[in-house]
Amino acid sequence: MLTRVGVPVEVEAEPSAPNPEPATLICFSHLRWNFVFQRPQHLMSRFAREMNLIYWEEPLDIAANEIPFLQVRDDEDGRNVRIIVPHLPNGMPQDAREATLKRLLDAHLASHHGPIVTWYYTPMMLPFSRHLEPDVTVFDAMDELSKFKFAPAKLLDLEQELIDRADIVFTGGSSLFEAKKDRHDNVHCFPSSVDRAHFCKARARQFDPADQEDLPKPRLGFYGVIDERFDTELLAKAAEMRPDWSFVMVGPVVKISEEDLPRRSNIHYLGSKTYQQLPGYLSGWDVALMPFAMNESTQFISPTKTPEYLAGGKPVVSTPIRDVVRHYGQLEGVKIASTADEFVAACDEAMELSRHPESGWLAEADLTLSASSWDTTQARMAGLMADVLGTRAGANAGALLVAAE
């Protein structure tokens, strides 16, 4: 039913049968489309090339006396993604919120025809969407959300219900796969991929962004969300030990207080940047950092930035995140360090590599990255969705499965 994305189409056998309606994929996500460009955006923008794509975000509050409504807009970059943001009156009881969301969802889907795929990044959106009867249900577990700060109490129960309902479960890394593989009979591991062409731009000399051009070198940088997964103490100690280094932090601060961030003259917080801007910042760094805290919230993460940094031609220094060690720890261009002393020493080693990309470490990284792309990941996911639809259609007499182009 999902044409040209590796998923079969069910049509009548007669040659004169009309073309089937395009499929609609509804992605229920806790991450806003325009927040940071990560796994959901990479995959959904690719599915949207051949499908109607609805990206359903978490609700925003409005005044208590206002009427609930949906804000509907198209992705500004023309990716054929329709972004839906529910607006609900502040203070509405939870039962009423879920009933209202269900009504708004049904009203929006009333004009949609053809097959439907529901794709969940969060089980918290199941209560108002569980009544839908999609052709395929996907749970893409990119994080262990129950380990995150302020996780809702009922998240685990809803996750189990979602796993029970799902036709396919994808995981964003090996550690998550190991945690979920025995909870469903159709679980597949898809670690973070990379848009190599985009980040390879950082290998060419570029003009520094205005807020970075005057920062002294050497520069050691991080981009991403700065939240409870970020080791602020490690950053503070490293900056204290190397006052001549510039530590460049790019990204929004979420779920932690600005007052809790380490403040030194050589730590520079540049705020959020767009996905398109990231290679420009990365190009001006000597070393790329992943100073993640080793706590519950990072137990299952598989950071997208590891392959992105390497694609940009920068050596990486990371704390011992399990999936980073497993997939990249054998590379010369990826240094693993636990303590501040080890981290600074690893940065010294990485800086030396940065001066000598011809020494072989970058070619080794490129060889590893050659097997990783978001296009390949999306195509493989689509193929697994095709398997689900093919199995079901095979049981229905009078139906013909037409292979995707």
Image: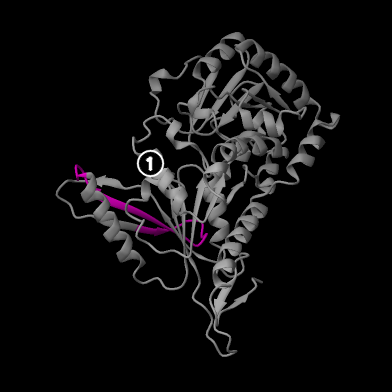
Q: Where 141 falls versus 335 (above or below)?
A: below
Asked if the stretch drawn in magenta spans residue 90, the answer is yes
- Residue 311 found in image quarter: top right
150 displayed left or right of 173 = left
Residue at the limit of the structure toward the right, as seen here: 359
Residue placed at 46% from the left, 33% from the top? 252
Q: Where 287 falls versus 140 (above or below)?
A: above
- Residue 193 found in image quarter: top right
- The residue lying toward the viewer, choosing from 387 and 216, is 387
- The residue lying toward the viewer, choosing from 74 and 388, is 388
The C terminus: image quadrant? bottom right
Element marked by disc 1: helix
Q: Which residue position holds label 1?
A: 157
**Residue 28 in the image: x percent, y percent?**
42, 52
- The residue lying toward the viewer, choosing from 38 and 96, is 96
Q: Where 12 falls versus 325 (above or below)?
A: below
- Residue 217 found in image quarter: top right
**Residue 10 in the image: x percent, y percent?**
55, 76
What stretch of residues is rendered in magenta?
72-93
- Three-letter amino acid code at disc 1? Asp
Residue placed at 30% from the left, 65% from the top? 107
Residue 132 can be seen, yes or no = yes
